[in-house]
Structure formats: C-alpha cells, structure tokens
Amino acid sequence: MTAAELNHEIRRKGSYLCVGLDSDPGKIPVHLNREAHPVFAFNRAIIDATHDLAVAYKPNLAFYEAMGTEGMEQLEMTVDHIRSVDPNLFIIADAKRGDIGNTADQYARAFFIRYDFDAITLSPYMGRDSIEPFLQFTGKWAILLALTSNPGANDFQMQRFSDGEPLYEKVLRESATWGTHDNMMFVVGATRPEYLRRIRKIVPEHFLLVPGVGAQGGSLEMVLENGKSTHGGLLINNSRGIIFAGSGSDFAEKARGAAERMTKGM
C-alpha cells in the first residue's frame, strides 16, 4: 500500500483511527474462555464491530508471543480475518524489533511474508543497516520509533547535543533519508503534542503513527491540529480505550461506541 492509497482510505472513511489489538488474555470477557481460541474470538468481535470506522489495526506482539505457539496461531488467524473483512485495512505488527544483517532480513521475511503484515514498528538506534532490509519489500512499511509517549523517553530521546538539537530530531533527520514517504513512517506519542508541529516540519509528508490517545491521556484535538500533513498523513492509535471499553457480553458494542466517539472528533 502506498501513502496515496492509505490517504485515500482515510478520506473515504473520514477516519485516522488505528485500533490497537493489545489483547491481554487476562482482560478479555470471561465468557470467551469457552471458545477454542479465546483471543481470536475477542479480536474477531472487535474487528467486526469497528472495521468500517478504522483504517488500520495494530496487534501488539507481546500479548501473542507470551502465549507461545497458541498465541502466534491466533495472531495469524486475526490477520487473516482482517484481510477477509476488508483487504484495504492496514495491518501493523507492533513488534519494535531492532537488529542488523541477516537477523533483520529474517524479521522482515517473518512479518511481511509469513504473517502478511503491511508494516512493522522498529527501533532505529542500531542505524541504517538495521532498517534497510525492511525497505526492500514493495508495498511494505518500516515504522521507526521517533519520540515515544512513555516517561522514560526523557532518558535518551530528549537529550540535547552541543548544537542544542535533541537526539530524537537527529534520528528523524537522518533516518528520513533511508526510505521514502511510501515505505517509512514514524512513531510520535500523543502525550507530547507540543513537539508534533516541530516534527511535522522535519518530516512534512511522512506518515506519523500516534499512540497515546485514550488510556494514556493524549489529546486528539492537539494531534489533529499539529500532526496532519497536507494530505492527511496520520494514523491515530487507541488500544485499551476501545478494545476494553466493555467487559461483558456486549464488549464489542461498547468497543464500537468508543470508536464512534473517537472518529467523530476526526
């Protein structure tokens, strides 16, 4: 999927919504435990209730890897279901990988070919050769961590060099030369909206994946005001605030209600 195609889907649906599938088995409604594949049953209901509102889904790999082979099987089932519901939905592997050489190449093959994701989140701090293998796949995306929403981002990302420029800006400027706005986007946390305008000047046409709206308290209004490109260029993620909006038998309806409230602000 190209940037133009992704922006077309955003305009068609009138939505920047990315639903994060952080599907913790300990938090899904208890009645689903009767299912053969409880996490997939949960994901399927969430997807069926929200796919007309969302443009992207973002399974968080930790919640699937922790279940071993059973979890990875349910992840694969989830990706297949998203494809069957709407082949134009953008699917992100929230894996935050970071390695070099043959290892990076195998990660790219695993997520882009074996599991059929459109994109994967990556740490760019090992440099260009840790990212390039992911850029060799036509229609696939590398999503680089730029400025994250957690408090620990101050430990390194905000540290300034002698010229006054913070580390995250240097990472943005350098890594933006490795790919194009058709195969690379950046993670920028919604809890730091005051930096979005500055970041948009550095990468004016790249997509930004923005987590932190919802349970983490980020402002949707500030993200839209400061983060949009001339064509759109945003994927705004909400995970817990949507998928765990309800915990009873009506959890999917509650998730849809939360997604509707969010997209009305877009």
Image: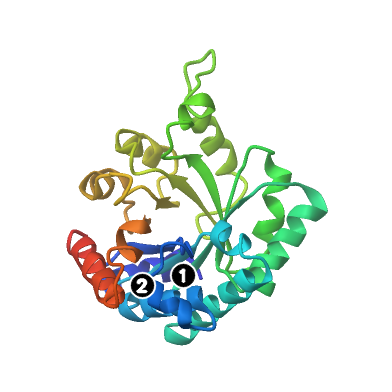
Q: Would you name the residue on which mark 1 appears?
A: 90
- The residue lying furthest to the bottom in this view is 84
Q: Is residue 227 visible?
A: yes
Circles 1 and 2: CB atoms closer than 8 Å: yes
Residue 256, position as x, y percentages in the image: 26, 72
In-image side of 149 versus 215 (left or right): right
Q: Nearer the viewer, residue 87 or 237?
A: 237
Residue 35, position as x, y percentages in the image: 48, 83
Label disc, if present, on residue 152 of the rendered structure: none
Which colouring convention does the figure follow? rainbow
Residue 145, position as x, y percentages in the image: 53, 44
Q: Residues within 10 Å of mark 1 (few under 14, many from 20)?
A: many
Label disc, if present, on residue 9 of the rendered structure: 2
In-image side of 144 versus 221 (left or right): right
- The residue lying furthest to the right in this view is 102
Q: Amino acid at mark 2?
A: Glu
| Quarter occupied by residue 127 | top right
